[in-house]
Amino acid sequence: DIIIYKMDFNIPKILAILSVKNSFRERYTETPYWKLKLKESKLTEHIKVFMITPDNDDEISFNDNPKKSRIVMEYELDGIYLAKENFHSSKKVKSIESLMFDLKDLLD
């Protein structure tokens, strides 16, 4: 995982966690679980959680007959960025090229 933070008065403020996964298999609930745990505390509820993946197993690429993993991750996470060309996008499921724009918005 990668932590995105900015310094506020010499104190780091975590803004986002980038969870990078090559494949999911049965692990698609791990990142949504930690997002839910962050939401439980006033100190961490602001932290965004983004998934970045090539989605080699096509677990989240297509929503015509969505798999359980896409439904869970799209609902719970703040964004999913796919490093591939052929997929069904949505407000939360985007190409990896969109990641830098969304992170820039988060830092502003």
Image (cartoon, rainbow, N blue to C red):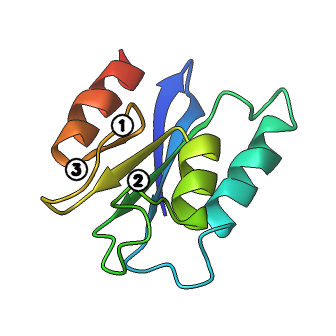
> Which residue corresponds to the image point at 57% horizontal and 18% vertical from the top-left?
9
Q: Name the residue under label 2.
A: 63
Q: Nearer the viewer, mark 1 or mark 2?
A: 2
> Which residue corresponds to the image point at 35% horizontal and 73% vertical from the top-left?
58
Tell me whether the residue at label 1 lies in contact with that at label 3, contact meaning CB atoms closer than 8 angstroms: no
Q: Mark 3 points at which residue?
A: 96
Q: What residue type is labelled 1?
A: Ser
Q: Distance between the residues labelled 1 and 2?
A: 9 Å
Q: Does dot 2 land on a helix, a strand or a loop?
A: loop
Q: What residue type is labelled 2?
A: Asn
Tell me whether the residue at label 1 lies in contact with that at label 2, contact meaning CB atoms closer than 8 angstroms: yes
In the depicted view, which residue is nearer to us: 78 or 16?
78
Q: Nearer the viewer, mark 3 or mark 2?
A: 2
The numbered disc on residue 46 is none
Q: How far apart are marks 3 and 2 (CA)?
A: 18 Å
Q: Does dot 1 land on a helix, a strand or a loop?
A: loop
> Which residue corresponds to the image point at 41% horizontal and 53% vertical from the top-left?
63
List the single residue furthest toward the left. 85
Say left or right for 71 vs 57: right
Say left or right for 47 vs 105: right
- Tell me where residue 3 appears, x and y as whole percent: 49, 50
Q: Mark 1 points at which residue?
A: 90
In this picture, is 30 found above or below 3? below
Q: Distance between the residues labelled 1 and 3?
A: 13 Å
Within the image, what quadrant is residue 12 found in? top right
> Which residue corresponds to the image point at 39% horizontal and 54% vertical from the top-left?
64
